[in-house]
Amino acid sequence: MNVIVANKNKELLANLDIEVIKRIDGIYTVDEIIGTFQNLFFNRMVLDITAIQDYSDLKNIQKLSISLDMSKVILLLDNGPETTSPRYLSQLISMGIYNFTTNKEGIMYLYNNPNSYRDVAQYQQFGEMPVNQQVKEKVITKYETVEAPRMGSTIIGVKSLTSHSGATTLIYMMYKQLKKNYTVVPIEVDKRDFSYYRDKQMVSVDTNEVGSVINKNFDKDVILVDINNSIAAEAMCHKVIYLIEPSIIKLNKMITMKPDILNELKNKTVILNISLLDLEEVKDFEMESRLSIFFNMPPLDDHKISEELNELLKKLGFSKQ
């Protein structure tokens, strides 16, 4: 059975060819919608976005996404320039909202063929890093630093390209330092190494759960994701740090397994991790690999915070240490 929440599009929604057990018309606060439907079993909810009070404020949509199973919700947008803008759609996807449309035909298609993340991934803008309204983003490139206010979590993924190049340890160290001044949750995908840190705030999930867990933690300032080999988790991150341990054996093994890997990494955020290279050697590495190295991280002692770690966090845009 299905439910409908309608306002400006109530005539359109009156003619849907679906069975409806409950329908409400008008404008409601997010709390009222949650209170009405949170404990009601339904197959699908068709939600007219104009029925949500202050729907242009994405914080209200975020609150709704945390409390309801958005895989069951088909969001009917108002076809206005704001709610159909690339940025707005990208934010919806970041909240785990994949079923949205502007017309009746779209509703019926999504009713019978609900979207997965893969179906809407092309609408997500990974060049932007939404952060909490109290924090200013710093997107640091080779050429400039751009600051702009954003909302929601900053989702940073870490992925090892050479075997055992320290992604889990680096995330743990970043988490320990960032949580002094930010709300942070570390998420590990498809492995259980986090359990050895014995920290209940560190979450281990499977690939099919990662979108839901990120969505539930969207109120945090920072979400750190140990990607491992999860394509889905990598796509959900606003910024991905790729780790290379620059030893000869590990570099040669990486290139043997993925001959085109260096071309794929151009214009991406690459860190030399567990690195014993000095400044001149890093420059040589950049010239030989034709990569721009974002940071050269020496081996870390996970019992204490290092100055190099603080420098990395500052370069990623976290001014509070």
Image: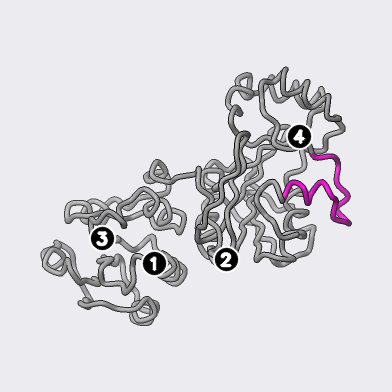
Q: Position of residue 311 (x, y in %)?
A: 77, 47
Q: Earlier in the sequence, mark 4 or mark 2?
A: 2
Residue position marked by numbered label 3 in the rendering: 76
Q: Nearer the viewer, mark 1 or mark 4?
A: 1
Q: On screen, 96 above or below 59? A: above
**Labels 4 and 3 touching (C-beta < 8 A):** no
Q: Earlier in the sequence, mark 2 or mark 1?
A: 1
**Judging from the image, what secondary structure is the residue with disc 3 in?**
strand
Q: Amino acid at mark 2?
A: Gln
Residue position marked by numbered label 2 in the rendering: 134
State the residue at coordinates (74%, 66%): 180
Specify start and end residues of the magenta stretch as a single range: 297-313
Residue position marked by numbered label 4 in the rendering: 272
Task: Give me the C-alpha separation between circle 1 and circle 4.
Answer: 40 Å
Q: Earlier in the sequence, mark 1 or mark 4?
A: 1
**Judging from the image, what secondary structure is the residue with disc 4 in?**
strand
Q: Nearer the viewer, mark 1 or mark 3?
A: 1
State the residue at coordinates (45%, 59%): 95
Circle number at residue 57: 1
Label 2 Cα neighbours within 10 Å, binned few <14 / some 14-19 / many ≥20: few
Q: In the depicted view, which residue is nearer to us: 10 or 71?
A: 10
Q: Earlier in the sequence, mark 1 or mark 3?
A: 1
Q: Position of residue 238 (x, y in %)?
A: 54, 47
Visual colour scheme: one colour
Task: Give me the C-alpha separation between circle 4 and circle 3.
Answer: 46 Å
State the residue at coordinates (64%, 37%): 269
Q: Nearer the viewer, mark 4 or mark 2?
A: 2
Q: Amino acid at mark 3?
A: Leu
Q: Position of residue 239 (x, y in %)?
A: 58, 45
Residue 247 in sight: yes
Q: Earlier in the sequence, mark 3 or mark 2?
A: 3
